[in-house]
Image (cartoon, rainbow, N blue to C red):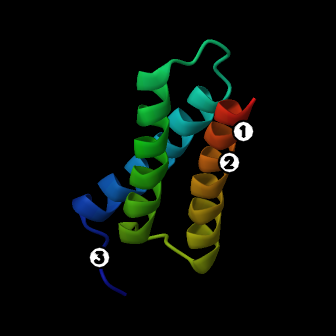
Amino acid sequence: MSKVTEEQKMHHYMGIEMNIQTWNLLGKEDRNEQDDVRMVNFAQASLYHWRKSYKYEPVNEQRGQWMLSHVYAVLVSFILC
């Protein structure tokens, strides 16, 4: 069994943290344009870090892609309303 590196642990932590930050911004009622940009960046970063995590599994890819599509859908629906 290979040893888990500190870098892999950091990617795991950051994948989780960026996901949490995305959800926090999705739930923010008075989100502004800067928050929207940060929300997209957090969702993209979460998926990036999950892909490098030592605990990465296909389900993490699916969740990350879903989160990105959800963020985009929320932003598009906000623009159209």
Sort mark 3 into few (<14), some (14-19) or many (20+) by Cα contacts within 10 Å.
Answer: few
The residue depicted at 29 percent of the width and 76 percent of the height is 3
**Nearer-N-terminus badge (1/3):** 3
For disc 2, the marked residue is 73
How far from the left and from the top, in percent, is residue 71? Answer: 61, 45
The residue depicted at 63 percent of the width and 20 percent of the height is 28
For disc 3, the marked residue is 3
Is residue 23 or residue 39 the one in the foreground? Answer: 39
The residue depicted at 34 percent of the width and 57 percent of the height is 11
Image quadrant where residue 7 sits? bottom left
How far from the left and from the top, in percent, is residue 16? Answer: 50, 48
Q: Is residue 58 above or below residue 65?
A: below
Distance, label 3 to label 2, CA atoms, is 39 Å
For disc 1, the marked residue is 77
Q: Secondary structure at mark 1?
A: helix
Q: Seen in the image, is 13 located left or right of residue 29?
A: left
Q: Amino acid at mark 2?
A: Ala
Image quadrant where residue 65 sits? bottom right
How far from the left and from the top, in percent, is residue 62? Answer: 63, 70
Distance, label 2 to label 1, CA atoms, is 6 Å
**Nearer-N-terminus badge (3/2):** 3
